[in-house]
Image: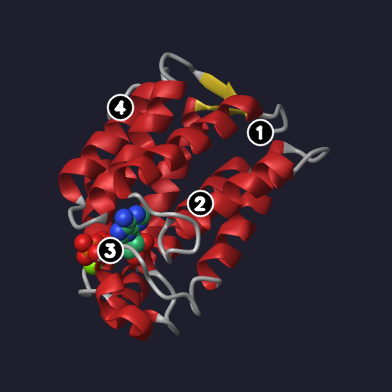
Amino acid sequence: MESGILNADTVVQWIERAAEVIEENEKTLTELDAAIGDSDHGANMARGFSAVRGKLAEFPRDDIGAILKMVGMTLLSTVGGASGPLYGTLFLEAAKISAGKPEIDRVVILQSLAAGLAGIQKRGKAEPLDKTMVDALGPAIRAFEGAEGVSLAEALAQAAEAARLGAEATIPLVARKGRASYLGERSAGHQDPGATSMWLLLQSLAEAGAE
Ligand code: ADP
Ligand code: MG
């Protein structure tokens, strides 16, 4: 990926890696959701990405938009909970930007991530610091945009690191959206499950981009 572009093969590798990482971390996501939700985030995400993985092998690799659309539709219909429609929206909005493209450069990657975040916020109405997945994706996008003068692989790594820090920074926050908000002040002191799964997805993207 020296070229500074992502091609459809790399996008497929990203999603395959994401499916593995979600599976490896299913228990962690479940435990995080047990503390401030209903203990289903690990199972929700694992179910969704397992369904995606089943479809990927046979899927054509000439159109990144078509791949991302398939991922979004599959997550929308299999993940459930609050996070399913939101992750579905992320991939469907990103898919619109990369429709018909066999490879995407940095500008299109940034536009895709930004469109995904805008879709999540339009649908879920979460603002930064509401203790949601937005708190991992938002900082990641800012880091990616600000990573000038470095390779695409390094920019993706910086985005993933910002997502990790963003997810960690949800620990002291009081949840203002989703199930965790029912706990009020008692939601503080726990890392948000959705911010954590968002970090895992961005970490997988950085790993695929580094190969
Ligand atoms: P549910 O809360 O319905 O059980 P999940 O457990 O799968 O669904 O997902 C919970 C995660 O979804 C939360 O940790 C949070 O990151 C995210 N989430 C919930 N509501 C919103 C929202 N309105 N906007 C953004 N993210 C949200
Ligand atoms: Mg839940």
> Residue tagged by mark 2?
137
Residue type, numbered disc 4: Phe
Most extreme residue toward the top is 100
Q: Depth check: 131 or 66 in front?
A: 131
Q: Are marks 2 and 3 in contact (CB under 8 Å)?
A: no
Q: Mark 4 or mark 3, which has the lower sequence index?
A: 4
Q: Is residue 100 above or below residue 110?
A: above
CA gap, disc 4 and disc 2: 27 Å
Q: Secondary structure at mark 3?
A: loop
Q: What is the distance, in whole Å, between disc 4 and disc 3 at their CAs?
A: 34 Å
Q: Is residue 7 left or right of residue 142?
A: left
Question: Which residue is at 69% across, 44% downward?
Answer: 155
Whether residue 137 sits left or right of residue 73 in the image: it is: right
Q: Which residue is mark 1?
A: 1
The Cα atoms of the two marked residues, 3 and 1, are separated by 38 Å
Q: Secondary structure at mark 4?
A: loop
Q: Nearer the viewer, residue 78 or 9?
A: 78
Please name the residue that numbered disc 4 is placed on: 59
Confirm or reject: label 1 Cβ below 8 Å from ligand 1. Answer: no
Where's the C terminus, which quadrant?
top right
Amino acid type at mark 3: Gly
Q: Within 10 angstroms of label 2, few (less than 14), some, or many (20 or more) residues?
A: many
What's the colour scheme?
secondary structure
| Residue at 69% from the left image edge and 37% from the top image edge | 152
State the CA–CA distance, disc 1 to disc 2. Answer: 23 Å
**According to the image, label 3 marks what residue?**
178
Identified at 68% across, 40% down, the residue is 145
Q: Position of residue 43 (x, y in %)?
A: 22, 64
